[in-house]
Amino acid sequence: MYGTERKNIRPGTKVAIVLKKDQRTGNLTHGVVKNILTNSPNHPYGIKVMLTDGQVGRVKEIEV
């Protein structure tokens, strides 16, 4: 599932995000959502979230 819609993401969801520093390479970082930072219902590049370890990035994949 893609991370472009806010309704699909909740705190505690396991996701793969791309960090700002990794946008060129596309390296994914895996973790659990702590906070949702994007207020709009969707975003073409992915919803911005903060992981439980404090890293911030845009959701590329929601892990099941």
Image: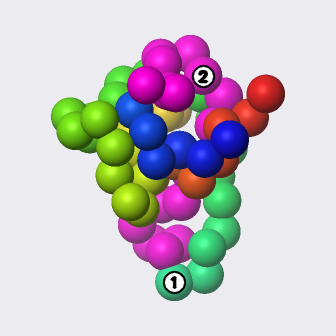
Mark 2 falls on what kind of element? loop
Q: Which residue is mark 1?
A: 24
* Residue found 60% across the figure and 22% down from its top: 13
Up-down: is 51 above or below 3?
A: above
Residue type highlighted by circle 2: Thr
Query: Which dot marks residue 13?
Result: 2
Up the image or down, 10 lies above or below 59; here it is: above
Q: Secondary structure beneath disc 1?
A: loop
Q: Foreground: 35 or 40?
A: 40
> Which is nearer the eye, 48 or 6?
6
Residue at 50 percent across and 27 percent down: it is 9
Residue range (magenta):
7-23
Residue 33 spot, x, y in % from top left: 51, 27
- Name of the residue lying farthest toward the left: 39
In which image quadrant can residue 44 be found? Answer: bottom left
Is residue 18 located in the magenta-colored stretch of the structure? yes
Q: Residue furthest right?
A: 64
Residue shown at 46%/47% (left/top)?
4
Please tell me how crowded label 1 is: few (under 14), some (14-19), or many (20+) other residues with Cα within 10 Å. few
